[in-house]
Image (tube, helix red, strand yellow):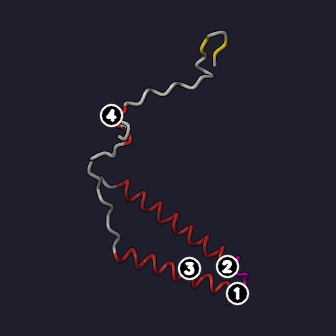
């Protein structure tokens, strides 16, 4: 915005630099992916997969037990099961973080 011929940078957006036609289709240096080697993630063991599957089945049984045997409402039973699942996930996350930070 100009007032009496004076340019005020706090109200005027900065002008974009001119585009060089020879580099119009290239990415800026910050957008170019790095060539640093990335370590692949550690494979998940069969024991871990079986433990997660066992916990999932036990949580499903817990929800059905509360709903059908204890005659709770379905929403209450589902909420109780989801709360237990999120609590277990939090515990696993904390244990994994502690174990990962202890490694040299």
Q: Which residue is mark 3?
A: 59
| Whether residue 89 is situated above or below residue 60 in the rendered picture | above
| Residue 32: x %, y % from top left | 34, 43
Which of disc 4 and disc 3 is earlier in sequence? Answer: 4
| Residue 10: x %, y % from top left | 61, 21
Q: Which residue is mark 2?
A: 77
Q: CA distance from mark 1 to mark 4?
A: 73 Å
Q: CA distance from mark 2 to mark 3?
A: 10 Å
| Whether residue 69 is situated above or below residue 93 in the rendered picture | below
Q: Which residue is mark 1?
A: 70
Q: Which residue is mark 4?
A: 22
For image coordinates 70% across by 76% down, the residue present is 76
Q: Quick one: 81 or 4, which is closer to the camera?
A: 4
Q: Tell me whether circle 1 and circle 2 mark residues in contact (CB < 8 Å).
A: yes
Tell me where the magenta segment starts and ends, as one range.
72-77
**Element class at badge 4:** helix
For image coordinates 72% across by 83% down, the residue present is 72
Tag nearer the camera, 1 or 2: 2
**Element class at badge 3:** helix
| Whether residue 93 is situated above or below residue 24 in the rendered picture | below
Determine the main secondary structure of the stretch shown in magenta. helix
Which of disc 4 and disc 2 is earlier in sequence? Answer: 4
């Amino acid at each position: 915005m100009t007032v009496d011929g004076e340019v005020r940078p706090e109200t005027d957006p900065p002008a974009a630099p001119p585009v060089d036609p020879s580099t119009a289709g290239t990415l800026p240096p910050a957008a170019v992916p790095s060539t640093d080697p990335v370590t692949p993630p550690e494979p998940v063991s069969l024991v871990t997969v079986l433990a997660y599957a066992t916990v999932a089945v036990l949580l499903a049984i817990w929800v059905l037990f509360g709903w059908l045997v204890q005659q709770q409402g379905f929403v209450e039973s589902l909420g109780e099961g989801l709360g237990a699942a999120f609590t277990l996930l939090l515990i696993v996350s904390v244990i994994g973080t502690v174990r990962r930070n202890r490694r040299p």
